[in-house]
Image: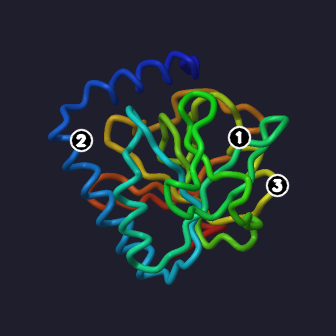
């Protein structure tokens, strides 16, 4: 088993090295399949994130989801490495905090986890059982430990590990589904979330 920090660094380097034209193709595919997914599953309230390089650029996806009439909720960092989700009301209601994270201002309406139809969880590396390596803050693991919500992650091919490759900590929580380039959906936790 590899060290999480080493895997995180390696995959982040791979993400940075993706040629812009290849990245554009992969992200456009993910956007298309995500839109089809939310339509098929009648999702109205989606927890999302404002990705920045070398993460997936989620801004174009957010705009397309808004065009479908969805409500988008983004995380807002709180004390003790906790977070809450608040309604995205356009970039004029966004502030930039630590590590270039874009989050809704405190005046934006908050939503309880139980009211979110689908939470799109970011990450650096994923295996096919839904285990993920995030950016090291533990915010999503803490949130998911306190809120029962259907989860899905958008994944580029360089982020996928076919088999578990790192040790899981007791507080690590897997995501329910992975949506991988070309529309492959991996059902990681069938007991929690079916199409």
Kindly state the secondary structure of the residue where label 2 is placed. helix
Q: Say how many tags the image has.
A: 3
Front residue of this view, candidates 61 and 163: 61
N-term-proximal mark, 3 vs 1: 1
Q: Is residue 81 left or right of residue 151?
A: right
Residue 43, how many percent across, how many down?
53, 78
- Give the x, y percent position of residue 153: 49, 53
Above or below, comparing residue 90 to residue 172 in the picture: below
Q: Quadrant of the N terminus?
A: top right
Q: Please give left or right for residue 142 compared with residue 94 in the image.
A: right
Front: mark 2 or 3: 2
Residue 19, horizontal then vertical, whole percent: 18, 32
Residue on which the image places disc 2: 23
Mark 3 — residue? Answer: 146
Q: How far is disc 2 from disc 1 in space, using C-alphas? A: 27 Å
* Residue 181 percent across, percent down from the top left: 30, 52
């Amino acid at each position: 088993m590899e060290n999480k920090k080493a895997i995180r660094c390696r995959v982040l380097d791979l993400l940075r090295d993706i040629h812009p034209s290849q990245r554009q193709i992969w992200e456009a595919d993910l956007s298309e399949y995500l839109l089809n997914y939310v339509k098929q599953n009648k999702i109205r309230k989606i927890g999302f994130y404002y990705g920045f390089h070398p993460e997936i650029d989620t801004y174009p996806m957010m705009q397309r989801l808004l065009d479908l009439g969805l409500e988008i909720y983004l995380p807002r960092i709180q004390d003790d490495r906790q977070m809450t989700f608040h309604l995205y009301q356009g970039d004029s209601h966004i502030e930039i905090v630590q590590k270039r994270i874009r989050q809704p201002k405190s005046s934006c309406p908050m939503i309880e986890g139980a009211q979110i139809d689908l939470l799109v969880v970011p990450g650096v590396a994923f295996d096919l059982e839904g285990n993920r390596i995030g950016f090291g803050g533990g915010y999503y693991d803490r949130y998911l430990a306190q809120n029962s919500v259907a989860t899905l992650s958008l994944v580029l091919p360089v982020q996928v590990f076919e088999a578990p490759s790192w040790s899981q900590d007791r507080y690590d929580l897997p995501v329910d589904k992975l949506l991988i380039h070309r529309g492959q959906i991996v059902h990681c936790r069938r007991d929690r979330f079916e199409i």
